[in-house]
Amino acid sequence: MLKILKNIVLQDRLTKIRNVNIDGVHFKAGLVEIGRLIGYEFASHMDIREVTVKTPLGIANGIKINDTENVVLVAVLRAAIPMVEGIMSVFSKAQYGMVGAWREKEPPFKAEVGYLKIPDINDKIVIIADPMLATGNTMNTIIEEMKKRGNPSRLAIFNVISTEEGVEKVLENHSEVEIYTCSIENELKEGYIIPGLGDAGDIAFGKPID
């Protein structure tokens, strides 16, 4: 399932973080807010139940989102860390995992997972956050490694920008996955999305020394 998010506030924040002159502080803040807004959208597709709550002046009808305590958030290092901060403001009871993955710089852009630290994901709602879904190779590799460790009840990917190629490749291999993204852009140059928003990890945290 692919859901392209057209929320006007979210699109405004996306426009701001694309600016070539943005600094790391404001870029990270934008990713935090985008993560929170995508989290709101995902929450609207979760099961709810009707409840009552006692107010200072009486009894009110309300709702409660089910299974918020069964959410596991997984950040793809390092770019997704600010996104997960925003998502956790929606799912404050979520558990947290991290994955480090590397993709070759030349076609066919093979990917390898070098680090994976996640809690139990069996029967959990698992959300993998990564700002970019480009070729889909890295995400497929991550999902394959995670499935060796458990069987989630739902598996969702939160991206800022995706490509049709990446989306199709993920869904072809993992048809149950739900992909939430803010934009679909189909030009790839050396494995990077054009116009995209640049290397999110480098902008947020500084370019590492090779």
Image (cartoon, helix red, strand yellow):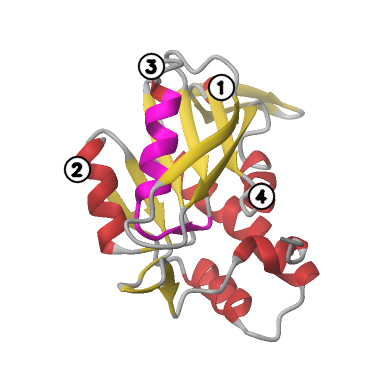
| Amino acid, disc 4 | Arg
What secondary structure is found at the residue carrying circle 2? helix
Picture coordinates of residue 201, whole percent (x, y)? 65, 60
Q: Could you tell me which secondary element the residue under label 3 belongs to?
A: loop
> In this rendering, which labeled residue sits more in front, label 2 or label 3?
2
First of labels 2, 4 by sequence position: 4
Say which residue label 1 marks: 52
In percent of width and height, residue 126 lies at 47, 29
- x 64%, y 44%: residue: 84
Secondary structure beneath label 1:
strand
Q: Name which quarter of the figure residue 48 lies in.
A: top left
Percent x, y of residue 7: 45, 66
Total numbered badges shown on the rendered structure: 4
**In the displayed structure, would residue 155 be above or below residue 197?**
above
- Residue 151, labelled with which disc? 3
Q: Nearer the viewer, mark 1 or mark 4?
A: 4
Asked if the residues shown at circle 2 and circle 3 are in contact, with their CB atoms under 8 angstroms apart, the answer is no
Give the mark, 2 or 3, whose residue is nearer the N terminus: 3
Question: What residue is shown with label 2?
Answer: 172
Task: Check disc 3: other Cα within 10 Å, few if <14, some if 14-19, many if 20+.
Answer: some
Label 4: which residue? 78
The residues tagged by marks 1 and 2 sit, at their Cα atoms, a distance apart of 43 Å
Q: Amino acid at mark 1?
A: Thr
In front of the other: label 3 or label 4? 4
